[in-house]
Amino acid sequence: MTDERERERRRRRPMSRIGDLIPAAAAHLGLADELRRARMVATFDALVAERAPAAHGACRAVRLDGSVLVVEADAPIVAQELRLRSMTLVAAFRTAPGGAEVTELRVTVRSRNPSR
């Protein structure tokens, strides 16, 4: 009878959201930085889709250098679009849940290997 009560008590624990459990599990496994980076990349991608749709799919967040978000664009025209909208993107990224305290957006154009 006691074992059954114990099992019943365990079942009645309040449910936890999986999103609340993942950061602790990632930290325990040593993956907290990777999780933070994945959230940053996903957040930037969503913001570009919303605020600079012409550039969506042709750019990606590469890294965070202090307070500078470094972004790679596939073509010069995409880089120009991102630079034109940089103030809006920085402000949105700063306030987004998966974002960070950035003050500047640095856009680089992906280098293409010349065919030989």
Image (cartoon, grey):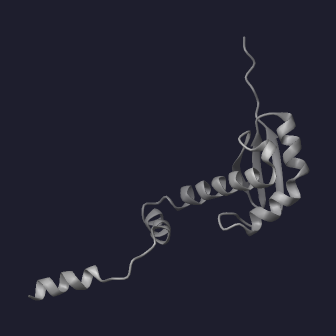
Q: Which residue lies furthest to the right in this view?
A: 84
Q: Residue furthest left?
A: 1
Query: In the image shown, does 76 or 54 lie closer to the viewer?
Result: 54
Taking the spot 55% from the left edge, 55% from the top edge, the residue there is 34
Q: If the image is split into quadrants, where does the N terminus sit?
A: bottom left
Q: If the image is split into quadrants, where does the C terminus sit?
A: top right
Residue 51 in the image, given as x and y percentages of width and height: 80, 54
Taking the spot 78% from the left edge, 63% from the top edge, the residue there is 92
Q: Residue furthest top?
A: 116
Q: 34 above or below 91? A: above
Res 10 → quadrant: bottom left
Taking the spot 76% from the left edge, 30% from the top edge, the residue there is 111
Residue 22 in the image, given as x and y percentages of width and height: 47, 65
Is 37 on the left-hand or right-hand side of 4?
right
Is 51 on the left-hand or right-hand side of 96?
right
Q: How many numbered discs, if any?
A: 0
Q: 74 above or below 46? A: above
Q: 75 above or below 25? A: above
Residue 99 in the image, given as x and y percentages of width and height: 69, 63
Query: In the image shown, does 74 or 62 lie closer to the viewer?
Result: 74
Query: In the image shown, does 52 or 44 lie closer to the viewer?
Result: 52
Is 30 on the left-hand or right-hand side of 8?
right
Is 63 on the left-hand or right-hand side of 106?
left
Residue 40 in the image, given as x and y percentages of width and height: 65, 57
